Image (spheres, rainbow, N blue to C red):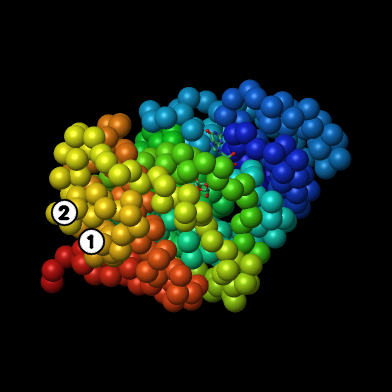
Amino acid sequence: MGSLVVFPFKTERPDVVLKNVRIAAHHESVGRVLCVGSHQETTYRAVEEAIPGIVSKTGTPVDLVLQDRIGTKRAGKGDGMNTGLRYFVDSDCDRLHFYDADITSFDDTWITKAETSADLGYDMVRHYFPRSATDGMVTWMITRPGFAILFPDSELSCIHQPLGGELALSREAAGTIAGDSNVLRQSDWGIDTLISFSAVQHGMSISEVYMPQGKLHKLYGQLTDIRRMVIECFSAIQALRGHVLDRRITHDVEPAEGVPASITGKTGYDFAATMTLIPKTFTFRQLDVLATLPAPVMEGMLSAHTGKVSFLNESLWHDVYLALLEEYIEGDDDWEEVLFLVWVVRVLAYTTDVADAGYDSALRYLEGTIHRYRERSAPDT
Ligand code: GDX
Ligand code: MN
């Protein structure tokens, strides 16, 4: 019956979403397309209006639904993806693809590459792509370190982009993930963390395919968007403490190609604007929270606003991360603020001390950090 392609979307440029829906509907491997909106707003109505035209041109059924309330966290992308998983389980489609709706570099090769790799028998195919050395800072500073620290002898921390929203699942794999209560609960930005975790926990084989053109998509307007993401992605990791990953999985990665200068030369965020987020003073409660982190953090954070950020190096970040895993209180405003600010300072420190020296050395350093964190957490033998 062909594959189902799901686009979760919130408020996006309708022309971008609709172009991607058309590309999917035109693809020979695709039997059905589903758009999952977060609520009834302008993008939703534009998609609703355009669907009949797309269906009559391509002959592929295209559906539009509002996301169901499935999880227990903030209602966000997780509810959108879980709505797509449920829809797939009830459909007669053979495979399930997810793509972010805001990708402007989306074309039929994203689907074709996933299909070709899935034909080899992998349970999950994930797309990965080149990113500038200062992009992906939630992945590099939160998710992969967390996976490395909690599950040092698992393949999990070796997945390149565990937060990526672009992936394909076999019918069986999608059924397993759709029935995993930890995934169903994760209605917020933590959904991608949980889907990656669930795949490894269930012993799925994973293939990562490389998209050399990169993922061009909507830029962050405000850092408040990424603030939620940092907080929710960290909480998702913290909730994984105590789980055991003891299954070896097959994990194959298509090698990356030379990265174009348009990507190596790009800065992922505005350094000066980000510096201004660091406060000169903290509330008493925030100081209490800072005091529970390793000693150099308090002193460092108090002078970080002057530009002295280098104290938060790889090694101290590891120790801070361990303390956060133990002490962080989900939903507590002061913990959220402190988590966000120490993450900001860590990103600034890495940018000045590592990323500014060049793309290749920065990427080697980032991969090296994940490796070193695994070694530090490996059980003594
Ligand atoms: N249905 C639904 N409901 N869709 C949503 C919602 C929601 O509440 N929030 C966001 N989306 C859609 C959005 O329209 C887009 O298509 C996709 O989800 C990703 O969101 P975007 O705002 O483009 O975030 P970003 O930073 O580009 O996302 C990347 O990182 C996320 C993460 O770090 O967790 C991307 O790889 C995401 O798939 C990933 O979840
Ligand atoms: Mn995006």
Quarter containing ligand 1? Answer: top right
Q: Which mark is residue 316?
A: 1
Element marked by disc 2: loop
Residue 333 position, x and y percent, is: 30, 32
Disc 2 residue type?
Pro
Q: Residue at x 31, y 59 (%)?
A: 308
- Real-space Cα separation, disc 1 to disc 2, in angstroms: 8 Å
The disc, 1 or 2, on the residue closer to the chain's N-terminal end is: 2
Q: Residue at x 48, y 49 (%)?
A: 273
Visible residue check, residue 116? no
Disc 1 residue type?
Leu
Relative height, residue 14 to residue 375 (above, below): above
Relative height, residue 155 to residue 181 (above, below): below
Report which residue position mark 2 lands on.
Answer: 294
In the drawing, does residue 96 fall left or right of residue 359? right
In the drawing, does residue 162 fall left or right of residue 329? right
